[in-house]
Amino acid sequence: MREPLKIGVIGANGWLGGAIVQALLDAGITSPEHLVLSLRSGEPTRFPGARWTRDNQDLADSVDLIVVSVRPVDWPALNIEAAGRLIISVMAGIRLEQLVAGVGSDRVVRSLPNAAAEVRASFTPWVASAAVSAEERRLVGRIFEACGTSAELESESELDYLTGLAGSGPAFPALLAVAMARHAAAHGIEAKVARQAVTQLLIGTGRLFEKNGYDPADTVGVFLDYQGTTAAAIEAMQANGFDEAVGAGLAAAFRKSISMGLPT
């Protein structure tokens, strides 16, 4: 009989690490007794039955698969030896070759879930080194499908770009919501009502897209064809540089993703 897969999560007390652990448990991919979790500070209050440690090398020595969920700035000090282990990084900017050199394993996966993993709605792009087997790739897919949806990419350059797009999670819709709420408030709408309006607008849009599989371009086209108040707003936003502002932001995020992996 095959031995159960033992999984370690470095940074399991953080928001993303904890969300991944909970998703693994909810999907039945693992169980608490087969989990080794590490934290740097504080006390563990979640996942009863799992083993917690402050020693990342102890974790690496005890498991078959390691999820590294720490800030990219903390990566150089991690200093673990994990030869023979499958490594999944959820750190932005740290490249495959850096992961291989840093952990001593050639079986590494670079990925970028976002904050929506907490509600099983993350889109997670990922790319694997050549040494990762087909069976291991299926396992990686299962892990990220437990967090929402995922896609295996062909190159790291694709992941660098999607770090700024998909990795943003709720940030860009929240930025739009802030701008809309401020404009409403400037026109005398009570702040609570404005926030409720824009929040429900985002929630409803997400649910419609999820339920019906709408193409965003088609949705915009429908409203433009109707030539009502929303069409007037879309045309004014585009005329005032909406597309250019979004493009500039994504380009800046792309450059930042690349620079984060460069030596300082």
Image (cartoon, helix red, strand yellow):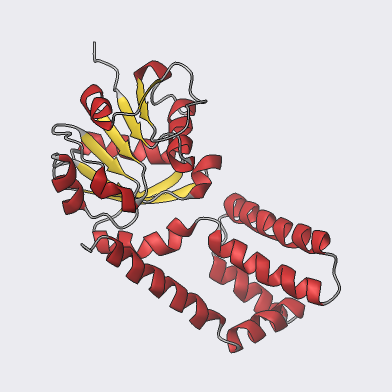
Q: Which residue does the image show at 20% across and 62% down from the upper left?
A: 263
Across and down, in percent, residue 102 comes to 17, 45
Q: Quadrant of residue 248?
A: bottom left
Q: Is residue 154 left or right of residue 43?
A: left
Q: Is residue 27 left or right of residue 135?
A: right
Between residues 48 and 158, which one lies in front from this camera angle? 48
Q: Which residue does the image show at 43% across and 30% down from the upper left?
A: 24
Q: Which residue does the image show at 34% across and 55% down from the upper left?
A: 92
Q: Which residue does the image show at 20% across and 36% down from the upper left?
A: 80
Across and down, in percent, residue 119 comes to 56, 41
Can residue 146 be seen in the rendering of this structure?
no
| Count of marks overlaid on the render | 0
Across and down, in percent, residue 109 comes to 25, 45
Q: Quadrant of residue 141?
A: top left
Across and down, in percent, residue 111 comes to 33, 49
Q: Residue furthest top?
A: 1
On-image quarter of the C terminus: bottom left
Q: Residue furthest bottom?
A: 239
Can residue 243 be seen in the rendering of this structure?
yes
Between residues 61 and 128, which one lies in front from this camera angle? 61
Between residues 58 and 96, which one lies in front from this camera angle? 58
Between residues 239 and 78, which one lies in front from this camera angle? 78
Q: Is residue 222 left or right of residue 15?
A: right
Q: Quadrant of residue 1?
A: top left
Tell me: residue 45, above or below residue 252.
above
